[in-house]
Image (cartoon, rainbow, N blue to C red):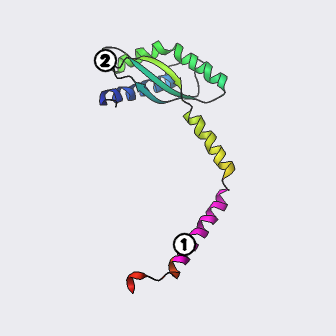
Amino acid sequence: MATRRVLKAAEAIREVIGMSILRDIQDPRVSDVTVTYVEVSGDMQQAKVHVSIMGTEAKQKLCLKGLQNAAGFFQRKIADRIQTRYTPRVLFVLDKGVKHSIQIAKLLREVLPPEEERGSCIGELKDDAAERSAETPNEGNE
């Protein structure tokens, strides 16, 4: 379990890198990037930055390369924000969770009936349940 100190450092690193990507990075390879979360090792020597990158696989690889090339810049920004003996070494990792969730949502839309049909089915189920409860006598009143 991560200590409170490590969790606070991870959150600070996420904020610093996210804002630096938005404001400071001039590299054209780095675009459409979202920092999803950061894992910091217990000794605070390494930080895995999980990023979600929209686009093709080639664009994702190119963007990761650009981010890794700017790792020293990010480490300097992190050193300004958190006071520790060692500044964590930054490693960028592609987070495919967002992409997977989009694919799952697309599959569910294909498999499940449209909203109108689902709404009418739910209404029918509620009506059936209400009829059944009205048919059965109340045992507590007898």
- Residue 59 in view, yes or no: yes
Using the image as rendered, state which of residue 35 and residue 127 is in the foreground.
127
- Front-most of residues 111 and 69: 111
Residue at position x 34%, y 26% in the image: 6
Nearer to us: label 1 or label 2 = 1
Q: Is residue 26 left or right of residue 106?
A: left
Residue hosting label 1: 129
Q: Locate residue 19, reporting x and y percent.
A: 46, 26
Residue 136 is inside the magenta segment: no
Q: Amino acid at mark 2?
A: Thr
Q: Amino acid at mark 1?
A: Ala
Residue 90, x across and y down, in percent: 45, 18
Q: Residue at x 47, y 22 (%)?
A: 20
Q: Residues within 10 Å of mark 2 (few under 14, many from 20)?
A: few
The span shown in magenta is 112-132
What label sits on residue 84 in the rendered view? 2
Q: Secondary structure at mark 2?
A: loop
Q: Please provide percent x and percent y for residue 86.
A: 34, 14
Please, is residue 9 above or below residue 72 in the view? below
Image coordinates of residue 132 in percent, x first then y, are: 54, 77
Quarter holding residue 60: top right
